[in-house]
Image (cartoon, rainbow, N blue to C red):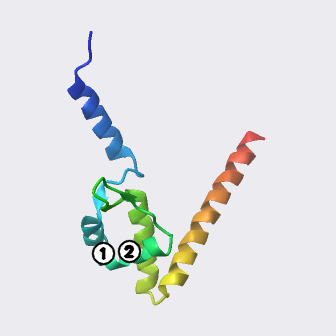
Amino acid sequence: MIPDPRDTAAADAADKFDDEHYPAYTMGRAAEMLGTTPGFLRSLDEAKLIEPQRSAGGHRRYSRYQLRIAARVRELVDQGTGLDAACRIVSLEDQLHEAQQLNADLRRSD
């Protein structure tokens, strides 16, 4: 039996909905969801904290994972932390989490 192409398209779409790294959100939508400005998101790109994918037309596209990072930076900035410091804090928190996960994985392997 030949699969219906619509079934594979639906399965592909479902996979994208579940993929937290899929760049599903435009800059405008991402800024709206975060309650911030597109300029704030551009500043995170300039700081190399978040590097959004680009659409065929060159527009920035953000994933849910990237939006969570941006939300954490915004939270720190709203608490009075400078943008550069907030980006560094979030980056270090992410590195620490990865190291802790690797450590836990290694302990389970022993």
Residue 51 in the image: state x and y as whole percent: 45, 64
Q: Looking at the figure, which quarter contains the N terminus?
A: top left
Return the mark for residue 38: 1
Residue 35 in sight: yes
Question: Residue at the right extreme?
Answer: 110
Residue nearest the viewer, comparing 70 with 58: 58
Q: Which residue is depicted at the point 39% across and 46% down?
A: 19
Compute the Cα span from label 1 to label 2. Answer: 6 Å
What residue is drawn where x is 61% and y is 71%?
92
Task: Find residue 61 and report its image quarter.
Answer: bottom left
| Residue type, mark 2 in image | Arg
Asked if labels 2 and 1 touch by Cβ distance under 8 angstroms, the answer is yes
Residue 47 position, x and y percent, is: 49, 75
Rendered location of residue 33, percent (x, y): 27, 68
Q: Is residue 26 left or right of residue 93?
A: left
* Category of crowding for the residue at label 1, using alpha-carbon neighbours closer than 10 angstroms: few (below 14), some (14–19), many (at least 20): some
Quickly name the residue at label 2. 42
Which quadrant, please, contains the C terminus?
Answer: top right
Horizontal and vertical percent position of residue 75 = 42, 78
